[in-house]
């Protein structure tokens, strides 16, 4: 554990450090206009309509994430999750009567920009807690700045095992792969009785960490991993990779993928003659997975962290409201973002408007309602949450359905 | 399980041809444009994306029959191509040849961002309406779409061949490709030829986007960049400007990738492709399928970079600016501003390095981010694994980047013009892929965490002032050295190589030695820049310095004025600063950035401060 340098309060108390107040007002107007034109809420525009229930000086959190660039789609999903959570929170009176709002700064998932954003947020006295960034390079480059300035960096997609080691101001409710992957291995090996597995994984820090843990967990459960292939996020052609997989003669295929690449792989299974059952990690849980995969994803098993038909109240509150607001099915990334706002609400409610008190509140808040965890409680040592919820799903007739315990017949229906 | 007489190799071969087919669709259009305007069109990938979206509108929103959708895509993208030529490129026809290249990068930013705003960044499904029968070959099968793609690729190449060989307009195109000025004197309407070529190539690019979108059942606004890159590689393998060669090159690239996966695994796929590209460039610089002998490019008619009169800043102004820059943290304590300017100084180091090789020596590098990555990893690993103090590790990293960078680019020293750019682009990709795959040294995709910050006597220099001052002081030192260097006889020698390497050689200049010297200096500067970034970021992995960083660096250099030291610094400040200034515009900021970039190129093609 790195030691924490002395907390530098002067950094964000300087009067010259807040030039943005008047500019922000003008900007807010411009963005509201832009939001009205495109139908997409910018900044906290989406929540403004409901803010009537909570009045008074708003409480702010900052978001550093991709709105443009190659990862922009994830930032767009985040926004939908944030806006929904804020609608609900502010309609219920906000935090002690004050509405919660956010400032979303576009980092393009680029460390050069995320560190500039970090300096901006730590110097802006309104910002009480920061959420993001998306990938490890962008997030972890900014961690030292947040840590030194004493502003909580709350990463909710940051599963890199070293992310929260950035300091005691770095917290995460991202699903720990050490917990998630054994569940996937359970599904594949114990439930589906697959013994010779081929693993395809994104060759990123997330995919690689996940794969290593999965392979270990699968071996402990008596299965053999006969092939492991890492692919780059921008790849679209998997035919030759899948021939390699086929030659290893597996009886099941495991995808450690996001939804777009997961769907692309599923579509290319049949053309190379693979009909084995497929088990995918929870991050493929998205309506886009079904849309992009078409018929090819029928029969894919996944262990999702939430399922719209689940009766848990947190899930029902999220899913019903999400459908009503955005007129589409929620995906995993929107759920992570929604959960992140609930955490921000809880720690601000408990810690007030002092940044250090908010950090300390993480150790005190218990059982924060969460779509992904049911009830989220942080472990003060790892600064993470454990106890991820999950359900066993299978794609049937172009829709996710609860797995009924039937053994896999064939991945192609 | 799937016994075949050929084993899996038949499958690998088929798969290579299937993906090669897809590369060919783009490579043909790129080859056509390059053949006539000697331009690597980075906007081609964006046109391909636009084609996919027009097709998506036709199929899912308007329910048009498939042939009508194809026609709509071809017409729409053909028009877009003509507009790109008219608005984006024709005004630059007398500008330095590097300006249109930059304009295509600007156009691609504008097109990609517009699509993202119109259609959202989410990927969308593009269902095919083709019959679903499949033909079994080997252990796998191919479908109707595979055959259609092959048909469109080969058919369009055949049509183009016929057009170029047997029609008057085709003759005009070929005449223009051979010698634009002579063609114009013979009465060829060169503008019309250019417009026609852009329209045809773009129509083809759009249809490819639609086909590939249907093939993967996915389209997204960023699909163009990677696809365009592969198309460029494929047409270079075949020989630039050579349409049948582009098809053969694409199929070969597909096969190389497929066999690479078969032999070494998926994570080596692109490594194989780029190593093959370098080998081909070095062994057969005109491409595999070019005629063995070819006229040397444009003897004695100037080169890639046209001369211009640089804006000379008076010494007192430069002195004043330096003092002001050094004193800024005393006046302004806003950490965001200092961090942004600190970033600008770090990128200025990269630009300084690139302006030396690209501007002064005329070796336009598109893989400069690779030098940053080498410097960053060298310094981080020296500090962490070898326990060397950071202050010592940073200059050592510079030396390593200089040595490795020069060695990697060395095979490309005998190349000229665009070939150098593509070879360096490949080197940049190779560096990233080696970092990804050499796990025992670099920790692979997990990356290097806990890189210690710069510190003096145990005190870490991490506050807002230091992230500003350290890069600034390093930058001032290197900029000073580079300015001195350029005004010495060495600078004149390097510029002589840029202006006319044949003449320079006949005066007894050893080209390889001087190019090597320039790359070594550039590698040192960029390596130190990358090392500093690693210590500021504290975490690096193979995605920290991606290919777009190289593009950004080149944009900075061209914007400031090639070879111009002050220009490189100005370019870095402008291009790091602009996106931050436009931050208020949220999703619109990259679009505004693209438009501003285009306007700058349009009205100041020689760069803000001019070429030195």
Image (spheres, rainbow, N blue to C red):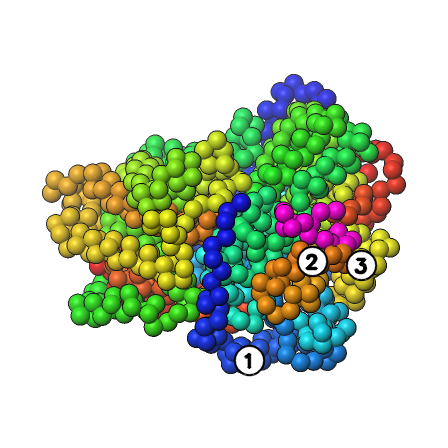
Mark nearer the viewer, 3 or 1? 3
Q: In this view, does B534 lie above or below B341?
A: above
The answer to which quarter of the image holds residue A51 is bottom right
The reply, left or right, for residue B120 in relation to residue B577 is right
Residue holding disc 2: A364
The residue shown at (28%, 65%) is: B326
**Circle 1 Cα neighbour tier, 10 Å, few/some/many (<14 / 14–19 / ≥20):** few
How far apart marks 3 and 2 lie (CA) works out to: 21 Å
The answer to which quarter of the image holds residue B9 is top right
Confirm or deny contact between disc 1 and disc 2 (CB under 8 A). Answer: no
How far apart marks 3 and 1 lie (CA) works out to: 34 Å
Q: The residue marked by circle 3 belongs to what chain?
A: A
Same chain, labels 1 and 2? yes
What label does residue B449 carry, if any?
none
Residue holding disc 3: A314
Mark nearer the viewer, 3 or 2? 2
Confirm or deny contact between disc 3 and disc 2 (CB under 8 A). Answer: no
The residue shown at (54%, 40%) is: B446
Q: Is residue A152 above or below residue B383?
A: below
Q: The residue marked by circle 2 belongs to what chain?
A: A
Q: Which of marks 3 and 2 is nearer the N terminus?
A: 3
Q: Which of marks 1 and 2 is nearer the N terminus?
A: 1
**Circle 2 Cα neighbour tier, 10 Å, few/some/many (<14 / 14–19 / ≥20):** some
Residue holding disc 1: A25
Could one spot residue B529 in this view of the protein? yes
**Circle 3 Cα neighbour tier, 10 Å, few/some/many (<14 / 14–19 / ≥20):** some
Closer-to-camera residue (A18/A69): A18
Closer-to-camera residue (A274/A386): A386
In percent of width and height, residue A243 lies at 64, 29
Q: In this view, does B475 lie above or below B1?
A: below
Report the magenta residues as a range. A371-387
In percent of width and height, residue B114 lies at 55, 65
């Amino acid at each position: 554990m790195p030691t924490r340098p002395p907390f530098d309060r002067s950094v964000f108390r300087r009067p010259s450090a807040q030039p943005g107040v008047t500019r922000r007002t003008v900007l807010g107007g411009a963005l509201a206009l832009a939001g009205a034109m495109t139908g997409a809420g910018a900044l906290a525009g989406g929540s403004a309509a409901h803010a009537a229930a909570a009045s008074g000086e708003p409480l702010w959190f900052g978001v550093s994430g991709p709105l443009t660039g190659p990862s922009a789609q994830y930032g767009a999903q985040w926004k939908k999750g944030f806006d929904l959570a804020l609608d609900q929170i502010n309609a219920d009176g906000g935090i002690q009567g004050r509405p919660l709002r956010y400032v979303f700064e576009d980092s393009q998932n680029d460390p050069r920009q995320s560190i500039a954003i970090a300096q901006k947020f730590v110097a802006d006295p309104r910002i009480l807690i920061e959420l993001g960034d998306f990938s490890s390079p962008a997030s972890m480059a900014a961690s030292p700045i947040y840590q030194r300035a004493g502003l909580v960096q709350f990463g909710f997609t940051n599963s890199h095992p070293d992310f929260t080691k950035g300091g005691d101001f770095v917290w995460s409710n991202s699903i720990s792969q050490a917990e998630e992957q054994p569940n996937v291995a359970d599904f594949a090996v114990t439930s589906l009785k697959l013994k010779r597995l081929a693993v395809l994984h994104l060759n990123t820090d997330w995919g690689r960490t996940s794969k290593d843990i999965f392979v270990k967990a699968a071996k402990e459960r008596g299965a053999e991993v006969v092939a492991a292939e890492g692919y780059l996020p921008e790849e679209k052609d998997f035919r030759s990779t899948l021939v390699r997989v086929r030659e290893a003669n597996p009886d099941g295929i495991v995808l450690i993928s996001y939804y777009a690449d997961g769907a692309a792989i599923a579509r290319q299974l049949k053309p190379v003659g693979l009909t084995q059952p497929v088990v995918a990690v929870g991050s493929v849980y998205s309506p886009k997975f079904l849309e992009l995969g078409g018929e090819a994803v029928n029969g894919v098993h996944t262990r999702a962290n939430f399922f719209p038909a689940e009766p848990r109240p947190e899930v029902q509150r999220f899913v019903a409201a999400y459908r009503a607001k955005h007129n589409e099915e929620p995906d995993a990334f929107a759920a992570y973002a929604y959960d992140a706002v609930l955490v921000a609400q809880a720690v601000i409610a408990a810690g007030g408007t002092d940044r250090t008190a908010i950090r300390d509140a993480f150790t005190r808040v218990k059982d924060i309602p969460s779509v992904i965890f049911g009830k989220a409680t942080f472990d003060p040592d790892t600064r993470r949450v454990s106890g991820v919820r999950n359900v066993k799903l299978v794609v049937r007739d172009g829709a996710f359905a609860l797995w009924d315990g039937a053994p896999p017949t064939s991945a192609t229906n | 399980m799937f016994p075949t007489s050929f084993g899996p190799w038949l499958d690998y071969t088929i798969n290579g041809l299937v993906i090669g087919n897809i590369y060919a669709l783009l490579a043909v259009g790129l080859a056509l444009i390059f053949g006539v305007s000697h331009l690597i069109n980075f906007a081609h990938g964006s046109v391909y994306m636009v084609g996919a979206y027009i097709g998506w509108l036709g199929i899912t929103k308007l329910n048009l029959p498939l042939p009508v959708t194809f026609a709509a895509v071809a017409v729409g993208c053909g028009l877009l191509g003509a507009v790109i030529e008219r608005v984006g490129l024709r005004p630059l026809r007398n500008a330095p040849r590097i300006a249109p290249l930059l304009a295509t990068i600007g156009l691609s930013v504008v097109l990609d961002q517009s699509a993202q705003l119109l259609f959202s960044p989410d990927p969308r499904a593009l269902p095919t309406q083709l019959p679903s029968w499949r033909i079994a070959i080997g252990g796998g099968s191919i479908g109707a779409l595979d055959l259609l793609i092959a048909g469109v690729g080969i058919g369009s190449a055949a049509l183009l061949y016929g057009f170029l060989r047997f029609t008057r307009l085709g003759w005009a195109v070929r005449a223009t490709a051979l010698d634009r000025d002579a063609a114009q004197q013979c009465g060829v309407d060169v503008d019309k030829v250019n417009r026609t070529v852009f329209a045809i190539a773009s129509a083809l690019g759009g249809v490819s986007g639609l086909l590939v979108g249907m093939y993967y059942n996915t389209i997204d606004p960023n699909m163009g960049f990677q696809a365009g890159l592969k198309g460029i590689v494929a047409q270079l393998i075949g020989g630039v400007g050579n349409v049948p060669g582009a098809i053969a090159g694409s199929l070969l690239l597909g096969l190389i990738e497929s066999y690479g996966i078969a032999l070494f695994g998926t994570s080596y796929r692109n490594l194989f492709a780029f190593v093959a590209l370098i080998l081909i460039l070095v062994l057969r610089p005109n491409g595999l399928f070019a005629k063995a002998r070819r006229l040397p490019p444009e003897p004695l008619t100037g080169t890639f970079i046209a001369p211009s009169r640089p804006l000379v800043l008076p010494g007192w102004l430069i002195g004043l600016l330096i003092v002001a820059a050094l004193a800024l943290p005393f006046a302004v304590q806003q950490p965001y501003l200092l961090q942004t300017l600190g970033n600008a100084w770090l990128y200025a180091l990269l630009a300084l390095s690139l302006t030396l090789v690209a501007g002064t020596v005329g070796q336009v590098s598109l893989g400069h981010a690779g030098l940053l990555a080498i410097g960053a990893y060298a310094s981080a690993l020296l500090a962490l694994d070898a326990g060397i103090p950071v202050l010592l590790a940073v200059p050592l990293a510079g030396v390593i980047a200089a040595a490795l960078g020069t060695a990697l680019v060395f095979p490309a020293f005998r190349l000229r013009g665009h070939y150098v750019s593509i070879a360096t682009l490949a080197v940049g990709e190779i560096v990233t892929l080696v970092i990804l795959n050499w796990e025992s040294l670099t920790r692979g995709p997990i990356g290097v965490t806990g890189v210690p910050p710069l510190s003096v006597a145990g005190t870490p220099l991490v506050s807002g002032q230091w992230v500003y001052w350290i890069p600034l002081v390093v930058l001032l030192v290197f900029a000073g050295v580079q300015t001195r260097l350029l005004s010495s006889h060495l600078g004149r020698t390097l510029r002589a190589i840029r202006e006319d390497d044949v003449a320079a050689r006949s005066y007894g200049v050893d080209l390889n030695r001087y190019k090597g010297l320039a790359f070594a200096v550039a590698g040192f500067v960029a390596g130190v820049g990358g090392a500093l970034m690693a210590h500021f970021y504290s975490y690096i992995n193979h995605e920290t310095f991606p290919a777009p960083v190289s593009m950004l660096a080149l944009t900075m250099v061209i914007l400031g004025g090639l070879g111009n030291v002050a220009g490189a610094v100005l370019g870095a400040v402008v291009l790091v600063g602009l996106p931050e200034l436009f931050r208020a515009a949220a999703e619109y900021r990259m679009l505004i950035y693209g438009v501003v970039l285009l306007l700058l190129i349009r009205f100041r093609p020689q760069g803000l401060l001019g070429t030195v």
